[in-house]
Image: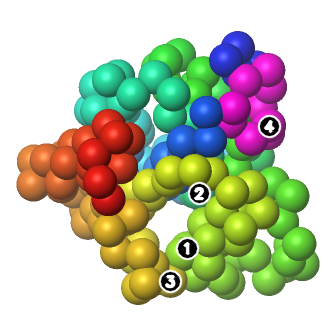
Amino acid sequence: MNGKNGGLGKVGLSRQVLFLDIDGVLHRGIARRSGRDVVSSAPNIQLFEYATVLDDLLSPYPEIDIVLSSDWSLVLGTEFTRNAIPLPSLRERIVGATFDGCTFNPLVWPVLTRGAQVLDYVGRNEPLKWLAVDDRADGFEAHRQKLVHCQTDVGLGDPAVVEQFRKRLQQLFSGEPE
């Protein structure tokens, strides 16, 4: 349960949201199911290898909640996905997933662009400020300044992307003009 907001799935009280993808962001490449487990697509890649990078980036912003925008949540469940993240400080920020409460047919959700999924959540929950970090840029064309775009094979291991992420967090969540 999210101690700050009372429970997984509730809209964050702060109404400041980071939409978080996992594959291609928190680790390089993609993950796949192997029985009841999830494993990296490459044996030399550790799942969630960049979780500490994200944690460090978010540490100056305690009011930012995380909404999962990852296929992990849809396929494996939000609670499973939340529990898979190795850092308690990140798990505690997670308040739900983009498809929570969506009005779309669940069969249609996976074929929507990532931007459409995020914007649907934004429309339903009206966060005051939001930012997305994802290796998918589809559907964000009108909101490029609200997307930190990672390359799937690098994720948050790219120093230029991390610096851009840091700047976007400062712009959006430090009271500076957007």
Front residue (pair 118, 86) = 118
Asked whether the beta carbons under mark 1 and mark 2 sit within 8 Å of each other, the answer is yes
Frontmost of labels 3 and 2 is 3
| Cα separation between marks 1 and 4 | 21 Å
The amino acid sitting under disc 1 is Arg
Q: Image quarter for residue 121?
A: bottom right
The residue singled out by tag 3 in the image is: 139
Q: Position of residue 126 (x, y in %)?
A: 69, 57
The amino acid sitting under disc 4 is Lys
- Mark 3 or mark 4: whose residue is earlier in sequence: 4
Q: Position of residue 123 (x, y in %)?
A: 71, 68
Question: Can you say whether 163 is above or below 12 in the image?
Answer: below
* Circle 1 SS class: helix
Question: Can you say whether 35 is above or below 132 in the image?
Answer: above
Tell me where the magenta segment starts and ends, as one range.
5-13
Residue 41 visible in the snapshot: no
The amino acid sitting under disc 2 is Ser
The residue singled out by tag 4 in the image is: 10
Frontmost of labels 2 and 4 is 4
Q: Image quarter for residue 71?
A: bottom right
- Mark 2 or mark 4: whose residue is earlier in sequence: 4
* Circle 2 SS class: loop
Asked whether the beta carbons under mark 3 and mark 1 sit within 8 Å of each other, the answer is yes
Front residue (pair 169, 174) = 174
At 35% from the left and 22% from the top, the residue drawn is 59
| Cα separation between marks 3 and 1 | 6 Å
The residue singled out by tag 2 in the image is: 69
